[in-house]
């Protein structure tokens, strides 16, 4: 049986390594906590009345599909609160998911799942592709 000895007479190297690990863990924890508030920090605060005034189209609708590779999702409109358009609307949500499972999202994207009800504050024409984000006021509605 072979016994290996470890000489720790120079504890400075060990202490620096442990300190670096704690700093790395601390920075990781801060990054994780910061992600939760990124969307709010990315938007300039606007009162609801101003968000409504800025929107070209506002509707309540149900997502017909999962996020797509283009970031455009279809919604079945339940009712238009501002503007008008077809019963099925395409919306650029900013959340992209490719068939292989990879994707991307921005800090202001809305993350919509199939079957969820949303109030969409859209820019553009409902007959083309609306653009929206959390900054515009789009939000998920209760079931």
Image (spheres, rainbow, N blue to C red):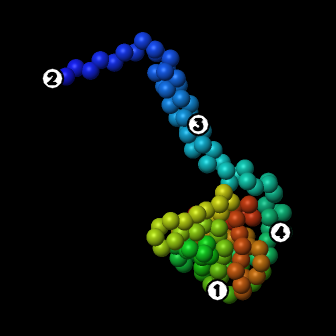
Up-down relation of residue 39 to residue 5 (above or below) = below
Task: Give x and y (percent) for residue 121.
Answer: 73, 70
- Label 3 Cα crowd, 10 Å radius (few <14 / some 14-19 / many 20+): few
Up-down relation of residue 133 to residue 68 (above or below) = above
Q: Which residue is mark 3?
A: 27
- Between 10 and 112, the residue placed more toward the observer is 10
Rounded to the nearest angstrom, the CA distance separating label 2 from label 4 is 78 Å
Task: Give x and y (percent) for residue 41.
Answer: 72, 50
Compare marks 1 and 2 and give the one earlier in the sequence.
2
- Label 4 Cα crowd, 10 Å radius (few <14 / some 14-19 / many 20+): few
- Label 1 Cα crowd, 10 Å radius (few <14 / some 14-19 / many 20+): some
- Between 72 and 59, the residue placed more toward the observer is 72
Assign a secondary structure to mark 4.
helix
Rounded to the nearest angstrom, the CA distance separating label 1 from label 3 is 47 Å
- Between 132 and 104, the residue placed more toward the observer is 104
Tell me, yes or no, if residue 14 can be seen here: yes
Q: Which residue is mark 4?
A: 54
Task: Give x and y (percent) for residue 15.
Answer: 49, 20
Rounded to the nearest angstrom, the CA distance separating label 2 from label 3 is 43 Å
Q: Which residue is mark 1?
A: 87
Compare marks 3 and 4 and give the one earlier in the sequence.
3
């Amino acid at each position: 049986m072979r016994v290996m000895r470890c000489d720790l007479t120079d504890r400075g190297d060990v202490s620096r390594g442990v300190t670096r690990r704690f700093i790395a863990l601390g920075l990781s924890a801060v990054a994780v906590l910061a992600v939760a508030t990124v969307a709010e920090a990315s938007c300039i605060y606007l009162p609801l009345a101003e968000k409504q005034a800025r929107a070209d189209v506002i509707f309540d609708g149900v997502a017909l599909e999962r996020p797509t590779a283009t970031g455009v999702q279809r919604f079945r409109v339940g009712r238009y609160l501002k503007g008008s358009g077809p019963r099925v609307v395409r919306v650029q949500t900013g959340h992209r998911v490719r068939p292989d499972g990879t994707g991307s999202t921005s800090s202001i994207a809305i993350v919509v799942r199939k079957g969820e009800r949303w109030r969409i504050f859209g820019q553009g024409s409902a007959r083309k592709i609306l653009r929206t984000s959390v900054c515009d006021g789009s939000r998920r509605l209760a079931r």
